[in-house]
Structure formats: C-alpha cells, structure tokens
Amino acid sequence: MNRREFLAVVAAAWPAANAFARSAAKNLVIDSHAHLSFRASPADEGNEALVLDAADKLGIDQLCCSILPKRPATVEGFQTANRVMAAAHKRHPDRFLGYCFVNPGCGQAAVDEIRRCLDLPGFIGVKLYNEHLCTDPIVFPVIELATELRVPILHHAGHSHYPVKEQPKMSDGGRLAELAKRYPEAKLICAHIGGGGDWEWTIKALRHAKTVYLDTSGSVTDEAMVDMAVKVLTADRLLFGCDMSWTAGIGKIRAARLSAEDRRKILGGNMQQLLARRARPQ
Amino acid sequence: MIIDTNAYLGPYAFRQLRYNTADRLLRLMDTKGIDKAWVSSAAAITHRNVQPANEELAESVRRYRDRLIPLAVINPFYAGWQDDLTACRELLGMKGLRLYPNWHNYKLTDKCCLDLIDAATALRMLITIPIRVEDYRQRSWLVDVKDLTPAEIVPLIKAKPQARFVLLNGTGYTSSLLGKKNNDLPANYWIEISRLSTVMANEIGKLVEVLGSDRIVFGTGMPFNAPDPSFVKIEVLQLSRKDKDRICGENATTLMS
C-alpha cells in the first residue's frame, strides 16, 4: 500500500483525517490560529469570503479556525458556534479546519461536544479561551479527552504584569507549562505570542515544557520575537498563525532569521505533523 | 524611493533593540530596501532631560545624514524646552519633532504643548506623534503609560492648522473623525501605516479613499518592530503604482523638503 492509498483508507475510516490527507499532500502554509465570525445559523456564511480573500492574498493555504460565541460561553453558545464551524468546513473543505470550542466549566456537556465534533469531518482540535485557568481541575476532563483523541488544544494565553480586569482567568505560558507537566501526552498550543503581553516572559516560561507549542500569531510585530522563540524553544515547537492580524502574521515570519527548513516547519510542517497524529494508528 | 517615517535609534528602557545603532539600522535598511529613515532617540522616551539624548542621536547619524534624518524629542513640560528646540533646529539641523505626551506628563492641548507646536511651526519643523511606543499589554511593571487615542489628537489638529502632523504607530482612524470624509479638519495631518490593515477591514485602502494617497506615509517602527509587515501591507494593497510610490516615499520627501 502506498502513502496515497494509506491516506485514503485512513480518511475513509476516520472523517477528521480527511484534513490530514489533504494537508499532507504538499508543504502547505497553515494558519494554526484563525477565527470565523459567530453567527446563529450555519447557513449564514458570515465573514468566510473575506477571510478566504485575505488568506489568498497572503498565500495561506489552510486556516485552523474556531468560532467563539459570547463568553463565558454557554452550552448552547458553543454548540451553535461549532455547528457553524462544521458548515464552514463543508463549504470550504480544503481551506477551513475547525477547532471545537467549548467552555470546560460546562462539564460533561463540554466533553460530549468535543466527542461529537471530533467525529465530524474537518475538526482537528480543541480551542479553549479564558473561562477557566488551564490548571483548574475543571479543565482536566477536556485535556484528557483531547489527549485520548490525539488532537491539539489551542489555549488562549497571555502574560501581563498587571491584573487584566477583563480576563481574570486568562492562562499564561507558565500555567500551560504546569499543565504540560501534569499531562505530558497532551499537545498544547500556547496562543499568540504576538498578542499575549510580555512575549519574552512567555518564551522563557515555556522553555522546559517540551510538549507545548507556541503560535506566532497576534498583532505585535516586535523585532526579534520569532528569533528568540526559535532560539529558546526551537523551530519544532512553533506554529505559524495570524489570529486575524494578517500582515503582522506573515510579516514576522518573513522577518525572522530562519533556515529554509525551519521556515517550512513553522509555516505548516509542524501543524501537519500535529494533524497527522490523529490519523496515525496508536 | 522608500522612506521609513517611523524609526528609532538608541537604547530603550524595557527591551533590547537589536538594530538600534546607526550602522546596524542601515544594515537592516539595506537588507529590506529602505532608502531613508526618520529617526529619533528611543532613550529620550524615558529620560527626564531629553536634550543629551537628542545630541547623542545627532552625533550618531552625523556621517549618514543622507539616509538617517534625525528628529528631536522635545518635552514642553520640562524646563528649558525652548532652548532645546532652538538647539535641535539650529545647531543639530533637525527638521522635525517627536512628541510623547503620555510619557512626558502633559496633554496635547496643554498650553505648553500648544506653545511648542507654535514655536516648531515657526521654525518650519514637522511634528510627529507616536500613538504608542509598544503594545500596551506588554508594558513593564514600572510604568503604565496608555496609548494616545485619535480623539485626543483631533483638538490639536484643529487648533493648529498651520502646523504639519504625522501620526505614527496608530490604528482605528477610520472609526474616528480623523478618517472620516468631510470631517471639517484642516488637511494638516498625515497617517503612517505600520499598524493599519490592508486586508479585511483594509484601513489603509479606506483612508486613501477618504484622505487621498498623498496623506498616507510608509513606516515600520523599526527597530522596535520588524519592518517586513509594512512591506507586506504595501504588497497586498490594491492601489496603483503611482499611489504606492506616493505612500512609500514621495509624500515623506515632500514633507521633509
């Protein structure tokens, strides 16, 4: 059985692996941290065309998206968001991949929603926001399920030297490192190095948490940011992302002093590997 | 010709800047294809007495005046600013200012600032105003300096129609009076692009529609910021070559001539 046949078999057996089958085809540029707009109806295409237009202009092949309802998210809110995400993937299966968004505070309903979504085509991971600190035991069932399903968890994060009144339960790189110690099998992604406060702090806090990835998204384009992340964490742990800050996202990768191989890994290779974990037999 | 209207030299109090000497900045500019840059002292942002930093800046660019155009940081809330301004213009040959009201403890509409604008305008100096230095979320535990808002700038623009302002490191103009059509403001302000979008919201495209391409200028924020994102903006901007040439260099040349 050649690679293509193998992928076809895997894809048929496991819907979410379709995404991997497509992305494994070539060195794709994959935005690991994207969003689509929340809307009540899956039939409503929202900002999908605008997002695709931006991605086309910037040479982004695939976007790993989540849709965030009003927060703190209710069960109904995240179920609606994920239904819209599923519809967006159906409309643009080669472009949009989905993170299942849940509020872990909703307990079994959150766990059930992850199981439901990750059984659908196009869902590739779990997205968590700031309803709970990632080290709160209420989050653990979600981490355990994502680990069992072999999918990454993209966790909103930021480190400020001041209390962030609007986000009292925002996690940071230090907490994600702590979570990684508890769950060394989990694949955690610390969100937006360019949108999460003191990025030097975050990079240093993640140094020894080898299973935590860092995405490069966010509006901050500070010189040396990606270079420091590569130096401290290695390119193997970085994932390209924009988080809707499009030119910032592409520009900071272009600015970084990277070998061709490291650039390939960051732009999509590492994310392809994460997607491949799902498809690979355990 | 590409002119970066938003560049800096010297040390910054809260973070290492890798390209903050004239030699290193020029090397970066050569790599990226930037012909000239308007530079001011990053150290002066946090110094009480800014003038030694202005003098240091002038000395550091002395051999490169064809490419590095120094601007003075003046604090009108500090003793002797009039002397500093005169020295910067007449002895150090600086043709413009950078103002940091929130870092230097004054408001743009305070009398001291209005006096500075008058004095600088009389000396035919351009006034540049960075809306922020760094992203507010990463500020040090030592200082809590907020970004300026477009709304704070409007009264100054109105009050001093003869002055010429360049607004740096800003965003959100299209939802403020500064980016509205028929806003009844004098056409005495220019907007720099480093934090503006070109896709989805496309703030640069909208500002060009409202203000014209002759009111937008190229800038990067280097060495605080990587210059590349600004180039990506220009690449994807759906404007004519002529409009892009204006933005990338012609407008800045006119402003500084």
Image (cartoon, rainbow, N blue to C red):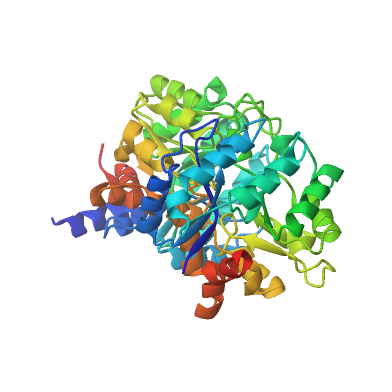
- Front-most of residues B29 and A131: B29
Residue at 69 percent of width and 34 percent of height? B145
- Front-most of residues A132 and A171: A171
- Front-most of residues B86 and B126: B86
**Quarter residue A4 falls in:** bottom left
Tally the numbered discs. Answer: 0
Residue at 64 percent of width and 73 percent of height? B214
Note whether residue B139 is visible.
Answer: yes
- Front-most of residues A190 and A256: A256
Residue B18 lies, with reference to residue A8, above or below; the image says above
A139 relative to B49 in the view: left or right: left
B252 relative to A120 in the view: left or right: right
> Which residue appears farthest toward the left when viewing the image?
A1
**Quarter residue B83 falls in:** top right
In x, y percent, where is residue B11? 50, 35
In x, y percent, where is residue B49? 66, 32
Residue at 27 percent of width and 51 percent of height? A10
In x, y percent, where is residue A115? 47, 40
B21 relative to B51 in the view: left or right: left
In x, y percent, where is residue A29? 36, 57
Note whether residue B238 is visible.
Answer: no
Quadrant assignment for the C terminus of chain A: top left
Residue B28 lies, with reference to residue A54, above or below; the image says above
Quadrant assignment for the N terminus of chain A: bottom left
B177 relative to B33 in the view: left or right: right
